[in-house]
Image: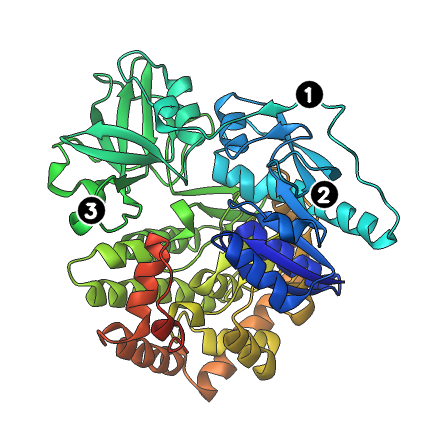
Amino acid sequence: MRILLIASAFNSLTQRVQAELRDARHTVATEVVRDADDVRHAVAGYEPELVVAPMLRTAVPEDVWSRYTCLIVHPGPPGDRGPSSLDRAVAEGRGRWGVTVLQAEAEMDAGDIWASAECEVPGGVAKSDLYRGEISDAALEAVRSALAKFATGSHRPRSQRDLTPTVRPVMRQSERRIDWQSDGTVAVLRTLRAADSQPGVRDAMLGAEWYLHGGHLEDQLHGTPGEIVATRAGAICRATVDGAVWIPQLRPVRAPGGRATFKLPATLALGDRLPDVPERPAPLELAPERLTYSEIRYRERDGVGYVHFSFPGGAMSTVQCRRLLAAYRYACTRPTRVVVLGGARDFFSNGIHLGVIEAARDSAAEGWANIQAIDDVVEAVLTTTDRLVVAALGGNAAAGGAMLAAAADEVWCKAGTVLNPHYRLMGLPGSELWTYTLPRRVGPEITEALMRDAEPMSAATARRIGLVDRVLPAGPSEFAPRVAELAAALAVDPATHQRLAVKKANRARDEAAEPLASYRDQELAAMHRVLFDPGAPHHALRAAFLRKEPVPRDVASRRG
C-alpha cells in the first residue's frame, strides 16, 4: 500500500513503524507535522491510500479524516482516552497496559477501533523505556493487524459506543509534585518514572527551579528528606522520608534569554550550586541484591564477561566513554572467552553526548575530547584478538553507538530494534572507525547508501545487509537471559578457538595493509574541521535537536 505516516516528531516509534512497514514492502513516506495545515499539506502532496499517525499531538482536521482513512496509534487500551495515558499508567503502578489503533474523527481518541494489543508493564520500568519496549512491540502488533484488516477492503472497525470511556486528561505539574517531607521512596520513584524523559518533574532545589529526569532506588543511603546526600557518575542522590533516590539528569526551568533548555547530567547542571557532598562511586562488580544506580556493571558467568552499560538517553560523554573503556579493559583481563557489551533494556548507545558538548564553555574542545574518547572504546574492541566480543542491542542504536556495535565480532539485536548507522542529519562526517568497519560488514556500496540516505532501519534489514548477525525474537525483559544462553554456548563451542585464530590473523593482515591509526586520523581530521568551524551546520543542528526547535532552512540544506 501507499502509506503516509504523520507524526509530531520522528521519534523511536515513528521510525520503527516506517522501517517495518517498508520491510513489509509498503511504500511509506513520513512527514513531521505541527498543526492541521501541515497535515493537509502532507496529505495533498502524497495522495496516500492510508494515513497512519504513530505519535501525533495535533488533531487531524475533518477535511482530511472524512476523505482518507486515518489510523491513530494510541498508547492505551480500548476505551482509554487522553494525552497522558502512559504517564498515568506508570504513576498508578499498572501491571498491564495496551495500545489501540483507532480511526480519526472529531473527538480525540473516540474513533472506531481497528486493532489493539496488550502488554506487560514490568515493575520499576520508567515511561520512556516502557514506550520504546513493551509499548512499541504492542504498537507494531496492532498496526500490522489494522493494516491487514484495511487491506481486505471489507473490514468494519469496532465502534466505541459499547465501551465506557476512561478519559485521562493531560497530567500537569501540579499532579506530579513531590512532597519530599512526606512522600516515601516508592511514591517518589513512581512520580519520577512517569515523567522521566518528558516532561520531567518540576521541583525547587538549591535556590532554583528544575525539571527532574529519571529515578533509581538507593537501598543504603539516608538523610534529611529532600537534601542531596551523595553524587555518582553525574547523578545526585536525594533523601526521602524512608530512603533515597538517584536522579541522573536535570533541566533548568528557565535559561538566560528565554531559550529552551535541555537535559544534562545533574551535577553538571547544578554547577556551583552543588553542595559539598561525598562522591560515592559504585564498584564495577555489584552484589546482585544491591539496589542502587550504576551506569556500568561487570559480571561473569559460564566463561562469559558481561559489560553492562546504560546511559540516560543513550548518550555517552567524554567521562562516560573513559569509564566504559576502563570497564572493558578490566573485562579483557579476566579468564573468559567471550565478552558481551550492552545486553540491557532500552538504548544501546547513541554515540557522543551532544548535551554536554552544547553546554561546555568551549563546545568544540569538548566535542573533540568526546570523539576521541569514544574512538578509544571502539579501537579497544577492534584490537581485542584473544576473545570474541558480542554487542548485544536490547534497544536502539544510532551514529557512533551503532558503529561501536559494528566493531564487535557479532552483533545481536532484539527484534524491533531500530538502527540509525549514519551521521549526516547532525552535520557530522563521523568517526568511531566507521570507514574501516562498515565496508567490511556491508560492502562499499551499501556503506555509501547508509551515509547518504540517513534513514532508520529495522533489525531485520540490518541482518539482511550484514550489519547485524542475529535478531532475537525476545521481549524487552527476555532479551538479556536469551543473550546469556547464547553467549555461554559460544564460550564452550569448540569452533570458537579456531575463530579466534582467524580473527587474530585477519586483524594482522588488515593492519599491514592499512593501520587502524590511518583510518582514525583521516576521520578525525574531517571531524576537526567541522567541530572547530563556527559556521558549520553541525552547531545549529545540535542546538535545534537538543532544544526541540525547527532546523533553519538554510542550515538544513547545508548539512551534507
Which numbered disc, 1 or 2, marks the residue closer to the eye? 1
Q: Secondary structure at mark 2?
A: helix
Q: Closest to the observer: 62 or 410?
A: 62
Determine the CA span between mark 1 and mark 2: 21 Å
Q: Which residue reaches farthest bottom?
A: 513
Crowd rating for badge 2 (residues with CA inside 10 Å; few <14, some 14–19, many 20+):
many
* Residues marked 3 and 2 touching at CB (< 8 Å): no
Inspect the image, locate mark 2, and give the three-letter code of the amino acid beneath it.
Answer: Ala
Lower position in the chain sequence, tag 3 or tag 2: 2
In the image, residue 517 above or below residue 246: below
Marks 3 and 1 sit apart, C-alpha to C-alpha, by 44 Å
Residue count near mark 3 (Cα–Cα under 10 Å), binned few <14, some 14–19, many ≥20? few
Q: Disc 1 residue type? A: Thr
Residue position for label 1: 164
Residue 342 visible (yes or no): yes
Q: Answer with the quarter of the image where residue 46 lies.
A: bottom right
* Residue beneath disc 2: 142
